[in-house]
Amino acid sequence: MTTQKVHDRVAELRDLLERANRAYYDEAKPFISDREFDEALKELRELEEEHSLQTDNSPTRRVGGQPTSQFPTVEHPVPLLSLDNTYNSDDLRDFDRRVRDRIPEESFTYAVELKFDGAAVRLRYEDYTLKLGATRGDGERGDDITQNIRTIGDVPLSLSDNAPSVLEVRGEAYMEKEAFVRLNEYREENGLQPFANPRNSTAGSLKMQDPREVARRPIRMFIFDLILENSDVERTQKSKMELLRDLGFPVCEHFEVCRTIDEVLDIIEKWDDLRHELPYATDGVVIKVNEEKFREQLGTTSKAPRWAISYKFEADQATTILESITLQVGRLGSITPVAELKAVVLAGTTVKRASLHNEDEIHRKDIRPGDTVVVEKAGEIIPQVLSVVNPARENRPSLFKMPENCPACGEPLVKFEGEVKWRCINQECPPQIRERIIHFASRDAMDIEGMGDAVVDQLVDAGLISSYADLYKLTTADILPLERMAEKSAQNLVDAIQASKLQPFHRVLYAMGIRFVGKTVAKDLASAYSSLDKLMKASSEDLEEVDSIGPKIADSVTSFFKIPSNLEILNDMIEAGLQFEATENEQQSSKLDGKVFVLTGSLPSLTRKEATEWIEKHGGKTTSSVSSNTDFLLAGESAGSKLTKAEKLGIPVIDESTFNEMVNRRTE
């Protein structure tokens, strides 16, 4: 390669990596995969070293993204470095050799942890109280996001007096896979750009200016490092994790100590198979020299420690043919282009469809029917088209263009200012009717058992229902003629519909499908306005007096109650006897009045959300961390550090069976 070509290639790689860094850290919209980024970075580093082209502002010297002007900037006393990455065992053995060359006479072990796919943060506690939460930023400086960190339930706001009075911890904020899916569904329904993966959704959420909005995002936290001031105790990574757990910090239970690099490789192989079973995304394994006393001797480079490395799993990707682009109509009228794919196996499942999100995204990636495309599971759950393999092929069809009319009802499509989605605003559009009824009957809304998608389809196709209010007019005789319906199953469905009339006001509000009104907003509205009548009389200005309500939500609520067809449906629901007044605390009993519960581990038949609802329905409340104020720890399988702390404090530990007896919950 000539000197000029080397300089050109270096400039090209630096530009690519700078743009990729901005997209990844600042905009939460990555346009290349982690593997492509790492390969480009490796090539750039090799060219710079071979031709002496290193500069201080090169991406090879950068850690993370730049701090932003939206938050105060804080200096990190101890830099938050990134880790060198590898994708193969040979590189890992080279790492092991370099470590042994630097400490040849020493006996040491490796600590092996899961690598979380989230956003790195630093927390500082002074006088046992959380004083600072900051992003990694460029490694030397980050953004002060303390108010946003305080909204994360996993983060202790204060520590017990057996903790050091001053300490710092590093951790990873993340989103669980199912929570990420629900968040993207909400964003797409409301005309917003979906996040590419849980990591970007977490990073984007932590940079929001309104902590109340951050509190609505399902952010979790794992702590993986501890820094103590003036500590002369020789620690290991293992002992630090145990201390963090004892202090009440959330730590990952999947942690192992290995004596050899072969043992490390065995663990990597194990987790490459098991990672899909975890509730959160992990993109690899972190290997650290376990004994902290060797870390200073091993030292660091400009951006990474020499005593640690991350082994990254290959992304779940496959190549297939995009056969056509179809359109899907959502509950609130959003039109989503969908890639119809030639069936391909991805992460153990057969994938035939993938969301293309919106017209702008299709144009950005230049996706056209007949293309060979790379498909990946975002967050190991949602199939998405990453790129086109053969964009230069002959006879490609013209670029996709959104139709002017709804593909389902033929009404004109509109795009609201500030949104990326085209939308059908016809309230009588058949797919919207179907999706609204499915949402109304869903577990988080009216929780009508047996009212699945297939049953809703049959009821709509048979002309038995055209709105969710029509559900309450159904009889066993209406349902019996439907396919796969016997007398008992028909009666069970009618009984389940009638039982849903007891659902509290806030769940009815959420079930109605008012745009921007999620579960939390519905609870806030039901609390502020104790009846439907009062809520309907409230102006947008009145609604904005509620803490969680902004202008967009307020306008959406008032607009909903101005649509004649919505008022007709509401009248039918009132006549049917649904709950349109809030009862005190929406409680079913006072059995758990004043009792504070902490949940940990996996329960046999209850999700964490369901257990929380049962506790609240009977007057109790839940918190995220165990303290002397905790009354009960409800523990399931793999309880972890919270169980250890509860036992240490003498807090009663109960299982699901005991809890069921406390609230008279039947499991049969």
Image (cartoon, grey):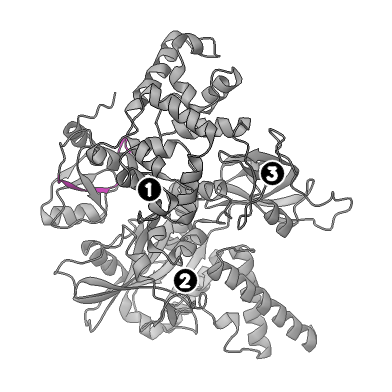
What is the x, y in percent for residue 95? 49, 74
Q: At which x and y percent is residue 494?
A: 41, 17
Mark 3: secondary structure? strand
Q: Which one is in front, 270 or 38?
A: 38
Percent across and percent down for residue 286 are: 44, 66
Give the residue number, with chain letter if any, for mark 1: 520
Instruction: State yes or no: residue 86 in magenta.
Output: no
Which amino acid type is shown beneath numbered disc 3?
Answer: Leu
Q: Secondary structure at mark 1?
A: helix
> Residue at the location (50% across, 11% down)?
478
Q: Are marks 2 and 1 in contact (CB under 8 Å)?
A: no
Q: Which residue is mark 2?
A: 309
Q: Nearer the viewer, mark 3 or mark 2?
A: 3
Measured Cα–Cα span from mark 3 to mark 2: 51 Å
Q: In the image, which residues are magenta?
A: 594-606
The crowding category of the residue bearing disc 3, from other C-alpha atoms within 10 Å (few below 14, some 14 to 19, many at least 20), is many
For badge 2, the amino acid type reads: Ile
Residue situated in front as seen by the camera: 264 or 435:
435
The amino acid type of the residue labelled 1 equals Thr
Q: Residue at x 21, y 39 (%)?
A: 655
Question: For the residues carrying marks 2 and 1, which lies nearer the camera in this image?
Answer: 1
Q: Residues within 10 Å of mark 2 (few under 14, many from 20)?
A: many
Q: Main secondary structure of the magenta part?
A: loop
Considering only vertical position in the picture, is 176 above or below 503? Answer: below
Instruction: Using the image, determine if residue 250 lies above or below residue 444.
Output: below
